[in-house]
Amino acid sequence: MRVRFVGSGDAFGSGGRSQTCIHLAAEGQVLLVDCGATSLAALKAQGLSPNDVDAVALTHLHGDHFGGLPFLILDGQFCHRTAPLLVAGPPGTRARLTAAMETLFPGSSRADRSFPVTVTELATDGTAARLGAATVRGWEVEHACGAPPLALRVELCGASFAYSGDTQWTPVLAGPAQGADLFAVEAYTFDRSIRYHLDYQTLRAHLGEIHAQRVVLTHMSSQMLSRLTDAELPAAYDGMIIDL
């Protein structure tokens, strides 16, 4: 599996980074983990075709993780996509997607398309769901967003990728991280505690509970970006590629 951090930034473009969009590719299958509002432009800027995306798995329904999905769907419509697009996310994803499309482009949720969009709402207890060639599991974490937020684990072609999504520290993170080839984890600040978000020092204190093969930091604020030289873990950047 090739993991590419198309977007590694926070909601506010700190450091000039694009919002969360993690591109997983293996044996001709392409899956996005999250699709923030800037994702379509970021994909195209990095030479990645949106029409090659088979599936999107969402951690939660904030705009910097979910807001690019309507644009991805509409781009497929206007670029004559024919392949189905599979979407998986927390409970409430189907209704929120419809509402977002109607808010951004009235009538777009009901438009005839040359490809189907199928939405699967994930369980919040780690129960496996199929998403095309991938297996996806979600665990509910702690991040207020109007619907259950999830940490995700994606297994594709024999490799496993896990992502914390946005959350303050919770022992639940040990579940998706267990044995994962790569665990991407939020480090929003270096040492400042912010409710519903994870800071680097708290993460560092709990690393003994994270039994992943590799850990990389992402979703970093300007304050965290200014302290990267003080961190012992590697940090993602837009365009970063990790082969598993």
Image: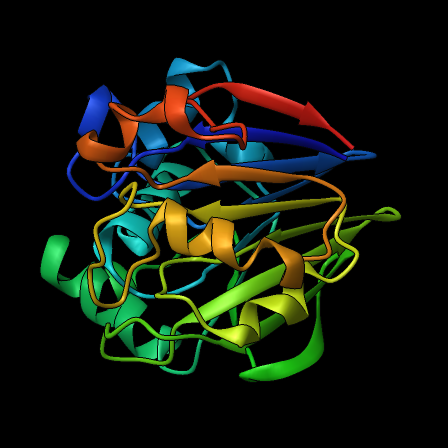
Instruction: Give the x, y percent position of residue 55.
Output: 58, 52
Residue 72 shows up from this direction: yes
- The structure residue drawn at horizontal position 39% and vertical position 73%, both measured from the top left corner, is 149
Instruction: Give the x, y percent position of residue 241.
Output: 61, 21
Q: How many marks?
A: 0
Instruction: Give the x, y percent position of residue 208.
Output: 65, 58
In the shown orientation, is residue 129 left or right of residue 65? right
Quadrant where the image shows the N terminus: top right
- The structure residue drawn at horizontal position 27% and vertical position 46%, both measured from the top left corner, is 191
- The structure residue drawn at horizontal position 13% and vertical position 54%, both measured from the top left corner, is 104
175 w.r.t. 8: above or below: below
In the shown orientation, is residue 99 left or right of residue 171? left
Most foreground residue, 116 or 218: 218
Name the image quarter holding residue 178: bottom right
Name the image quarter holding residue 224: top left
Instruction: Give the x, y percent position of residue 117.
Output: 49, 61
32 w.r.t. 203: above or below: above
Quadrant where the image shows the C terminus: top right
216 w.r.t. 162: above or below: above
Residue 114 shows up from this direction: no
In the shown orientation, is residue 209 left or right of residue 56? right
